Image: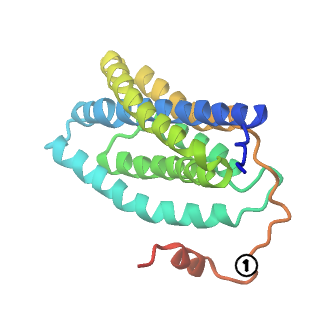
Amino acid sequence: MTTASVAPSPSSKTNKWRYTAAFTAFAVLSGIAFYGTMSILVPQRLRDLGIENSTAVLGAINSAGSVASIFIALFVGALSDRTASKWGRRTPWIFTGAFVYGICFWSLSRPSSALIIGICYVLALTGLNMVQVPIYALISDRVEEESRATISAAIGGGGVIGQGIGTLIGSLFITNMEVGFVCTGLCALLAGVLAVVIAPREPSSKNMHKDAGKPLWRVVVESLPRR
């Protein structure tokens, strides 16, 4: 006696491709924003400001952003796990983070010192992590197991495409940097907004059970990987 395999329902197939399209849009647009800004526009901005050894300064800014991202990602992940709202646990973070990400990347065109550029960059990474961490969590939260490899591949491929397009856009606007920063800021904003709009709506988490009284630091510590 054999068991017949159950074909995926039409709604399941639709959701798979909606998630694939949403996460691909995020990866492409975020790649355009990040690489266009940090590979082309910000280095040129540092040179235009007359900063000595701008390459070393850019390296220091990137290093500070990388270290900050480790802690930002932990806090965002812990907080989004505990978020109770009618829009779900992840959606409010993605939507809010998209605006922080976009506005901070645009604001990189305004500072007149390397220190302020570094601060704006760390704030932009805060917005990026507010989008990126919940989006990756949605894969395990909402996507069927057999579809996760397809969606992960779409994110990886989209990031590569975005890197190339972002470098091209940054190069095109290197002599008109204000417009270039506007373009990359809009891409950063749309990366999160389109991910929310295209993907299936997340169910409400208002009635979600929360660890009452447990401090945030303990939630963060418990979220760290263990051997």
Answer above or below: position of 4 versus 208.
above
Residue positioned 57% across, 62% down in the render: 77
Answer above or below: position of 22 versus 211.
above
- Graded by Cα atoms within 10 Å as few (under 14), some (14 to 19) or many (20 or more), the crowding at tag 1 reads few
The amino acid type found where label 1 is placed reads Asp
Res 193 → quadrant: top right
Residue positioned 44% across, 20% down in the render: 179
Q: Is residue 193 visible?
A: no
User: How far across and down, in percent of the image, does residue 85 sit?
Assistant: 80, 57
User: How far across and down, in percent of the image, does residue 78 sit?
Assistant: 59, 67
Residue positioned 57% across, 47% down in the render: 131
Res 47 → quadrant: top left
Secondary structure beneath dot 1 equals loop
Quick one: 12 or 103, which is closer to the camera? 12
Quick one: 148 or 65, which is closer to the camera? 148
User: How far across and down, in percent of the image, does residue 16 sit?
Assistant: 65, 36
Quick one: 37 or 136, which is closer to the camera? 136
Tell me: 125 left or right of 146. left
Q: Is residue 145 visible?
A: yes
Residue furthest out toward the front: 1
Residue furthest out toward the bottom: 213
- Quadrant for the C terminus, please: bottom left
How many numbered marks are there? 1
Quick one: 191 or 185, which is closer to the camera? 191
Disc 1 designates what residue? 211
The scheme the figure's colours follow is rainbow
User: How far across and down, in percent of the image, does residue 117 sit?
Assistant: 36, 45
